[in-house]
Image (cartoon, rainbow, N blue to C red):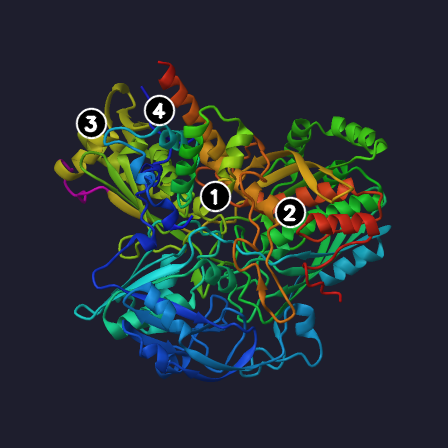
Amino acid sequence: MLAVQADGHDVMTVEGLATASELHPIQEGFKDEHGLQCGFCTPGMMITAKALLDENPDPTEDEIRWALSGNLCRCTGYQNIVKSVMWAARKINNQAAN
Amino acid sequence: MSLDEIKIGGMGASRRRVEDNRFIRGKGNYVDDIVLPGMLHMEILRSPLAHARIKSIDTSKAWAIPGVRLVMTGEMMASRNLAWMPTLSYDTQAVLATDKVRFQGQEVACVIADDPYIAKDACEAIVVDYEPLPVVVNPIQAMAPGAPLIRDDKENQHDNVVFDWEVGDKDGTEKAFAQADVVSKLELHYPRSHPSPLETCGSIADFDRATSKLTVYMTTQAPHIIRAAVAMVAELPEHMIRIVSPDLGGGFGNKVPVYPGYVASILASILLERPVKWIEDKTGNLISTGFGRDVYLRGEMALRKDGKILGVRMHTDSDHGAFFSDAQPSKFKIGLMHSAFACYDIPAAHLTARGMYTNKAPGGVAYRCSFRVTEAMFFQERMVQAAADDLGMDQAEFRRLNFVRDEDFPHRTAFGFLTDSGQYAKCLDVGLEAIGYKDFLKQKEEAKKRGRLLGIGISTMTEPLGAGNSREYDILGIKMFDSAELRVHMSGKAILRTGAKSQGQGHETTWAQIVAHELGIPADDITVEEGDTDTAPFGMGTYASRSTPVAGAAVAMVSRKIRAKARKLAAHLLEVSEEDVEWELGRFYVRSSPDRGVTIQDCANAAYSNMPDGLEPGLENTAYYDPPNLTWPFACYIATVEVDPETGVWDVLNVVAVDDCGVRINPMIVEGQIMGGLTEAYAMASMQFITFDAEGNCVGSNYMDYLLPTAWETPGFELHEVVTPCPHHPIGAKGIGECATVGGPAAFVNAVMDALKGTGVRNIDMPLLPDRVYEAFTTRRDISGMPPVKTED
């Protein structure tokens, strides 16, 4: 995406995920499910997952894999990234239900 | 009374990673995150041609661009004796080209400017007049009579041969072949591939004239080797060089060598007396930095009718590119290729290996493997499957029949390695059970009747991980040991430093677990630091799955030294003699009175506040560990596939991995390593390769052309374990980081070949792109070599 395409939009980066006191469930999910190794792709993966979960709070494994397919990871083999996103979805949905 | 080891994050705990706390917040500190005051930026001009004489270089237009501080060429480097540098394999490599360029993407000139955009523009303003020369793009061309001489810079180099090397028992192997009922032959190519960590290479050189100290922040898996190399190349005193390897965005072997960009940024900083940052772009990384693989094999196996392997003969022709900069032990010219067939009981074997220069970027880095072990195990397992097919035997039974048996360890392999432990047949059984082998064979037969092509591929292997021992393993004469330093503070908290360097393996988490296991200090109380040569003890770094086997062992040994001193402090505190003190995790107690005890934290406090007369204060130590042998993990990978005969597309149905890496420090991290490795294995088998056209143009210089699997293509994996502790490692662990990359590819290829069994197709070289599979299936012919350049043409 080119910078001009973001004109008039809010831009959220990884730094915007956590609040001062709390991690975002996606961040917790990535840590709990070992969804990262070298960490270099992690901000992109997490923000992509955020966009997915904002649109689709209860995605299937295939939907997660498709949503993440624009991002590369060389360390994890993706399986744990998918599990991380599912972990986050569960937590967000549980929070909403309560 | 003893502590619960899992609760304190000791061995066997799937402890969540410490390093994640910064990465998930976007607070990783990679080299490009580092900004120094007054920092300038460097860009490299690369050769567009693969082989050409440099007639002239005109830099005047570049100098004229405002903001340009320095333009460097080979001529300028030569005037400082820096135009050439030594490689890790006793060859030389051009820093900036002087006489001619020898591969596309070779470094020709550098510009240092106020910002990276000016530097890039100025590079484009440099005019280089090239006289093109004939190009050599594979070892077969390189060997041909009358082939252009690539390394005319070297005295006594009259052809393109890098080395001719052999190992094994030639006569014994000939005898074995004379007695064979069947000789099974296979020719294979393991294609050139790039490790492609997501972070490219880069450096910030910061020379301080006032102190004469050079600090280099850089992407390196082996900071101490780099310090030694910089001392040698730049002729700076070693104590005035500080190499800092910050967070690395992956390495996979790509960040072991010394690259021209590092050297150029160092010289630029010395000349300009300002920090100089060089961050390689993706294309620069893909076309110029350490490739892996690119080996051709002629393999033969002597077989008895009943399935026993009598002997193995291998010949490899490897493509090393323009400079022999393989990162591997000095003694072995084709790495540990001769670890092939280590899991099989084979009476005789012989390997001849020839390495060739070509007009390609330097190759031969240990791409997520222990020095050519990936090629060795791929060749082995493809040959094993072909042999089983030639004999009409079941591929699992053929393996079982030839495995080294559990009771036969230690076992000397036909090529001379000493394997020491394993339960090979058990691992195979676990794998066959998990994949449902017998049922799948029935399904396959049923499917065949309906025109569907199912296949199952097995790959079993033990590989040598954790170089060295110092008797046989060195790089540039430096022996391959490693180290750990542990400082326990007054409160019992601690800092640990090692000579290894994590690139995602999670050392900050797992090293603390080893200390917790040995001392009972909770893992959360231990900070782990690596990568700064001014503070870390000397070590050879992280690659070839050597961290846990060597540095991890040093962590255990230094913890034991600390425990030995703590015992003296405990005896003093308990007012008994040392012999009367017993240890349980985290606590010393009086043997005759177990309720009387002191914790390791009490001992730490005493080391600074209440030591006995004659005992040196403090509680810190260093251990250098020289392993007695390599570690030998074993793995069984099984894949099932379905090939579409209409398109050649093959889908992975199931993948089962059974890994025996001995004792697991952190099961979660071990499994993460295996899944990552399996993905690279699938990538190699299915799509990931970089090829070159006849002019030496690199096809695969960006992520549009170089296919890496995404979450969408990558299959799921089912993991299983068997544990055979390493008999010589202090905590019984073996290497694991690379097993799946090494053993995995053959499982996928064997599965596709199994699906095509009976069609007359014996081999398709990787990558098994759909068009290659389709062509093989429809023409009933093997597909050899690298697409699109077929070397047999």
Q: CA distance from mark 3 to mark 4?
A: 27 Å
Q: Which is nearer the N-term, disc 4 or disc 2?
A: 4
Residue labelled with disc 2: B686
The residue carrying mark 3 is B574
Check the residue under mark 1 and report the chain it is in: A
Amino acid type at mark 3: Leu
| Chain label for disc 3 | B
| Label 1 packing within 10 angstroms: few (<14), some (14-19), many (20+) | some
Give the residue pinned by disc 1.
A71
Viewer can see residue B228 = yes
Where residue B7 is drawn, which disc sits there? Answer: 4
Residue B194 vs residue B596: left or right?
Answer: right
Task: Kindly indicate the quadrant of the structure image that contains residue B716.
Answer: top right
Discs 3 and 1 share one subunit = no
Residue B194 lies in quadrant = bottom right
Residue farthest to the bottom, as pictured? B55
B676 above or below B124?
above
**Residue B514 point in image, percent of width and height:** 37, 37
Residue at 28% x, 46% y: name it: B621
Chain letter for the residue marked with disc 2 in the picture? B
Magenta stretch: give its range.
B610-619
- Tag 1: residue type? Asn
Q: Residues within 10 Å of mark 2 (few under 14, many from 20)?
A: many
Front-most of residues B193 and B704: B704
Q: Residue at x 39, y 57 (%)?
A: B220
B360 left or right of B1?
Answer: right
